[in-house]
């Protein structure tokens, strides 16, 4: 079936690509990201998009758009059943990651991206600013032109991309679960004495 038809994505990819890891649901904003990539592809930008995530109910329209897209399987790839080793390979080979979510509780894929030394081009929402700080490149998630502009700018500005990547490698420290639990306990008034 379509959702598992790109199991050899790493072998099929030709050239640079951007990775978006997220459950397929409306708040993750896949439709607007696809609009942004249509802008880039119409401009002749030679950059692929790899989408990884399990679809939620009611997301058939987006899946159909991906399946029937003129560049599906050539510049647009979708994996619903991506194993850990394949996901690790995708993170390792992508230029950077993208995340156009409209709202988030946290944003673990951004932490995963940064932990692997990859810059994030992401929505200008408070939680993403908290997570990515100076390692993020921000856009208006409701504007495909804004998304396209930031992706295109980072793609063509290799010095900036290399600088961000180097900065992440030397300065980024992923959050630790112990620290997160401590913050929650402190917030709830269960601080250690």
Image (cartoon, grey):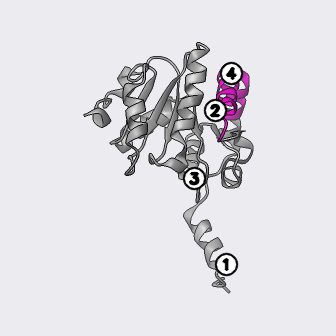
Q: Nearer the viewer, mark 1 or mark 2?
A: 2
The local crowd at label 3, few if under 14, some if 14 to 19, many if 20 or more residues have their Cα within 10 Å, is: some
Earlier in the chain: of badge 1 and badge 4, it is: 4
Residue 21 magenta-highlighted:
no
Tell me the magenta residue range.
142-165
**Real-space Cα separation, disc 2 to disc 3, in angstroms:** 20 Å
Mark 4–mark 3 Cα distance, whole angstroms, equals 26 Å
Q: Which residue is mark 4?
A: 158
Q: Are marks 2 and 4 in contact (CB under 8 Å)?
A: no
Q: Secondary structure at mark 2?
A: helix
SS at badge 3: loop
Left or right: 11 with respect to 95?
left
User: On the rendered structure, is 144 left or right of 94?
Assistant: right
Residue 178: name its quadrant: bottom right
- Residue 19 x/y as whole percent: 51, 34
Residue bearing mark 3: 107
Magenta: main secondary structure: helix
Above or below — where is 171 with respect to 74? Answer: below
180, 37: nearer the viewer: 37
The numbered dot on residue 144 is: 2
> Quadrant where the N terminus lies?
top left
Q: Earlier in the sequence, mark 2 or mark 4?
A: 2
Q: Residues within 10 Å of mark 4 (few under 14, many from 20)?
A: few
Of label 1 and label 2, which has the lower sequence position? 2
Which mark sits nearer the N-terminus, 2 or 3?
Answer: 3
Question: Which residue is the extreme one toward the left?
Answer: 1
The Cα–Cα distance between marks 1 and 4, rounded to whole angstroms, is 42 Å
Asked if the residue under mark 1 is in contact with the one under mark 3, i.e. CB atoms within 8 Å, the reply is no
User: Which percent across, then down, holds residue 82?
Assistant: 35, 41
Q: In front: mark 2 or mark 4? A: 2
Note whether residue 45 is visible. no
In the rendered image, residue 57, in percent from the top left (x then y), is placed at 37, 51
């Amino acid at each position: 079936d379509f959702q598992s038809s790109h199991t050899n994505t790493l072998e099929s990819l030709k050239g640079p690509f951007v990775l978006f890891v997220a459950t397929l649901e409306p708040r993750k904003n896949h439709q607007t990201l696809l609009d942004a990539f249509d802008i880039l592809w119409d401009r002749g930008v030679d950059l692929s998009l790899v989408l990884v995530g399990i679809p939620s109910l009611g997301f058939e329209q987006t899946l159909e758009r991906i399946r029937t897209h003129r560049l599906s399987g050539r510049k647009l790839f979708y994996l619903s059943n991506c194993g850990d080793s394949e996901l690790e390979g995708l993170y390792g080979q992508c230029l950077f990651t993208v995340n156009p979510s409209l709202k988030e509780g946290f944003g673990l894929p951004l932490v995963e991206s940064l932990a692997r030394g990859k810059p994030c081009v992401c929505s200008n929402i408070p939680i993403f600013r908290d997570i990515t700080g100076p390692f993020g490149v921000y856009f208006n998630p409701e504007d495909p032109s804004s998304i396209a502009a930031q992706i295109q700018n980072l793609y063509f500005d290799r010095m900036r991309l290399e600088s961000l990547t180097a900065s992440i490698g030397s300065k980024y420290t992923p959050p630790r679960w112990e620290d997160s639990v401590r913050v929650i306990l402190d917030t709830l008034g269960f601080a250690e004495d």
